[in-house]
Amino acid sequence: MNEKTIRSCNSAGSISRRIYSALMIAAICVLLIAGCRQEGSQTSVLDSPGGKNTLSKGERMNWWRNDRFGMFIHWGLYAVPAGEWKGGKVQGIGEWIMENGHIPVSEYEQLAKQFNPVKFDAEQWVQIAKNAGMKYIVITSKHHDGFCLWNTKYTDYDVVDATPFKRDILGELAQECRKQGIRLCFYHSIMDWHHPDAQAPFYPKYNDTSKSNPNFDRYVEYYLKGQLKELVRNYGPLGIMWFDGEWIKDWTRENGWDMFEYCLSLQPDIIVNNRVGNGRQGMRGLSKSDEFAGDYGTPEQEIPATGLPGLDWETCMTMNDTWGYKSDDNNWKSREDLLHKLVDIASKGGNFLLNVGPTAEGLIPGPSVERLAAIGEWMKVNSESIYGTTASPLGEVPWGRCTAKPGKLYLHVFDWPTNGKLEVSGLENKVKKAYLLADKKRSELLVTREGREKVVITVPSKAADPVNTVIVLEIDKK
Ligand code: FHN
């Protein structure tokens, strides 16, 4: 409608003027909203239906980017057979015994009657994580076998209705995490070998990615979403919804975005890993592109060779070769190796989610507890060089790794120089001060510059910690 015509209808007077100005105001409002939508679009995709989420991704990810280190807990009915079935060993990871043993649902369900972890102590578990320097816990609320570790109204196949234990494990953990200041997060499997509208009908090959279930949408809309709401409502606020099992045929990219938005509509500041979408590139764990839903990449059992600038990622890893408890798996990584992995991951700007697989009695295996305690000893002295750090600006260094904060570099020395001279290449910044992080007095170490980008630090002949001694360099910000 053009300028003129509007004026000619003066006499029709004021009504039309009022309509006109109302229309103008409405138009301005629409433009305004459109304007701020444009501005907010990089914040989150969630200005859509729920429209409630005004938190930027950065705001949601802040704690996660700072905390760097979490505990993964794979626990469920599979801890009962612990890798054996009908007297025979079943190959593969413990939590896949139902699939690898081709166990019918009716038989596998019977394990619930034997699940009675009387030694389960939420306070002790959270304490073990906290003492190790872990800041968040991701526990399997439901793994692929479909068994639920909380009192859900959507099925009786849960720890309260189906086992002699009858205690709400996630409820007890949620309480203890709140008490000890640890963020609780849930690993929730999209694939479900127990649910008739999901993969149960695919027996004996539940993980058959060529098959589809005509009722799968019903499973998603009613069961999966219903339970996720229960978990957030009953045990939240949660840190992360850690999805898995997204590789099934029935799970689409659209499902991923829909579920991502659904989780944020339940809790606007929740973080959702990239396994909500189906764009993950195998164990490398990164999404093919940001066309796929999810806040961060999830490499599994591997550490990216180099840092991944601009990408949020978290390596999840076992301490032996299984996620769920297996009685005969004693292929434990050494404490030195695990500590070096934590530092290696932080030096590349990633998070480390280190797994424990508790026994059917409810105990975290001794070798896991020992290794976590050892990491905790180191973190008590050196956690400043992990929490809140970013990837090394130095790239590969021959003697260890490096993490950074504004104006500070943390040199993690795995191989202490026998000649007492630590060479640091690729460093043009002026070094203002150098000292051992373990040295409370912060007594200065001698630093000499050799050329534009190399300094040599004179260090004590013996390392303070043979596994990893940290030297702090206070540097000029360029
Ligand atoms: O199949 C699962 C496996 O059981 C375990 O949960 C790991 C942990 O990230 N994820 C899947 C394998 O990629």
Image: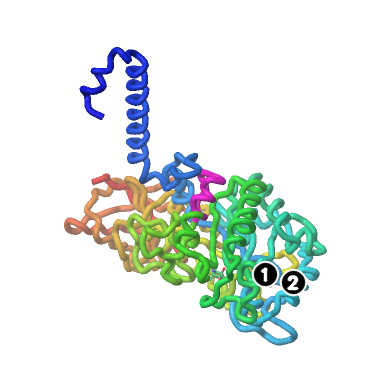
Q: Is mark 2 within 8 Å of ligand 1?
A: no
* 17 displayed left or right of 46: left
The residue where tag 2 is placed is 109
* 399 displayed left or right of 243: left
Numbered disc 1: secondary structure? loop
Determine which of the numbered discs, if any, sits on residue 368 in the image: none
- Which amino acid, by three-letter code, is at mark 2? Glu
Q: Is residue 269 magenta?
A: yes
Image quarter for residue 424? bottom left
Q: Is residue 64 magenta?
A: no
Query: Residue 214 placed where, x, y %?
Result: 58, 69
Query: Residue 399 placed where, x, y %?
Result: 35, 67
The answer to whether mark 1 and mark 2 are in CB contact below 8 A is: yes
Tell me which label, 1 or 2, sits earlier in the chain. 2
The residue mark sitting in front, 1 or 2, is 1
The crowd level at tag 2 (other Cα within 10 Å; few <14, some 14-19, many 20+) is: some
For the point 77% across and 56% down, which residue is it? 167
- Which amino acid, by three-letter code, is at mark 1? His
For the point 55% across and 55% down, which residue is it? 241
Q: Quadrant of ligand 1?
A: bottom right
- Residue furthest out toward the right: 164
Query: Residue 356 placed where, x, y %?
Result: 61, 66
* 169 displayed left or right of 19: right
The residue where tag 1 is placed is 194
Residue 118 versus residue 18: which sits nearer the camera?
18
Image quarter for residue 20? top left
**Which residues are the magenta region?**
259-272
Q: Relative to residue 266, is residue 338 depicted above or below?
A: below
